[in-house]
Image (tube, rainbow, N blue to C red):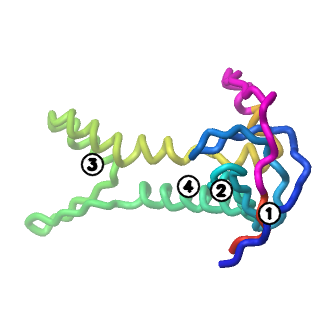
């Protein structure tokens, strides 16, 4: 693992704060596999991962497919007196609810279906289609700004593998 020397770069205008020492500094463009470090403490602020949106989108789509397959096929099977009873995750929650165990049914439903469904939101899709994070923040009413009057450019190092 080798790191290049710090280089001088032209700031892009966006301001970032170091998570270690809280120094405000301007973000600089990074080369492929480049690392952005804090000028004061040297903590890693940002890293340029090539094709990161494509990889995130691929993982998200693969997880959606696997989640659909996991919920389409029976996961619980019980054979009693020669009779095979199978059910899916949603079916197990339904049976628990019908048997009067609604707290457990709610817990099973939340942990096996609702929370995983909520985590499969299409995070990288808006970014891949060209919608900027600022536009996403503006659409949800996030109007927090950063005071950039005292910000300097963060230190940039070369390739880091």
Instruction: Name the N-terminal-most of marks 4 and 3.
Output: 4
Q: Secondary structure at mark 2?
A: loop
Report, in whole angstroms, how far the alpha carbon at label 4 lies from the one at label 3: 21 Å
Mark 4 neighbour class, 10 Å CA radius: few under 14, some 14 to 19, many 20 or more: some
Task: Return the residue at label 2.
Answer: 42
Q: Looking at the rendering, in which quadrant would you find the C terminus?
A: bottom right
Image: magenta residue range: 136-155
Whether label 4 touches label 1, CB < 8 Å: no
Q: Secondary structure at mark 3?
A: helix
Tell me: residue 92, above or below residue 160. Answer: above
Report, in whole angstroms, how far the alpha carbon at label 1 lies from the one at label 2: 11 Å
Report, in whole angstroms, how far the alpha carbon at label 4 lies from the one at label 1: 41 Å
Provide residue 123's location: percent of width, then percent of height: 64, 46
Task: Return the residue at label 3.
Answer: 92
Asked if residue 90 can be seen in this view, the reply is: yes
Mark 4 or mark 3, which is nearer to you?
4
Instruction: Name the N-terminal-most of marks 1 and 3.
Output: 1
Asked if residue 53 can be seen in this view, the reply is: no
For the view shown, which residue lies furthest in the bottom direction?
1
Mark 3 or mark 2, which is nearer to you?
2
Point 21% across, 39% down: residue: 104
Quadrant hosting residue 58: bottom right
The circle drawn on residue 6 is 1
The circle drawn on residue 64 is 4
Counting every numbered tag in the picture gives: 4
Query: Is 146 colored magenta in this rendering?
Result: yes
Mark 1 neighbour class, 10 Å CA radius: few under 14, some 14 to 19, many 20 or more: some
Report, in whole angstroms, how far the alpha carbon at label 3 lies from the one at label 2: 52 Å
Quadrant hosting residue 52: bottom right
């Amino acid at each position: 693992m080798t790191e290049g020397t710090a280089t001088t770069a032209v700031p892009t205008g966006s301001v970032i704060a170091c998570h270690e020492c809280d120094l405000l500094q301007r973000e600089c463009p990074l080369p492929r596999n480049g690392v952005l470090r804090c000028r004061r403490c040297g903590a890693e602020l940002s890293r340029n991962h090539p094709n990161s949106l494509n990889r995130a989108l691929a993982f998200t789509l693969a997880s959606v497919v696997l989640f659909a397959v996991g919920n389409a096929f029976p996961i619980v099977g019980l054979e009693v007196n020669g009779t095979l009873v199978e059910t899916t995750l949603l079916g197990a929650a339904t049976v628990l609810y019908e048997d009067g165990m609604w707290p457990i049914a709610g817990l099973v439903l939340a942990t096996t279906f609702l929370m995983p469904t909520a985590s499969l939101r299409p995070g990288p899709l808006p970014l891949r289609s060209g919608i900027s994070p600022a536009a996403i923040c503006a659409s949800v009413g996030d109007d927090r700004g950063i005071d950039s009057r005292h910000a300097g450019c963060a230190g940039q190092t070369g390739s880091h593998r």
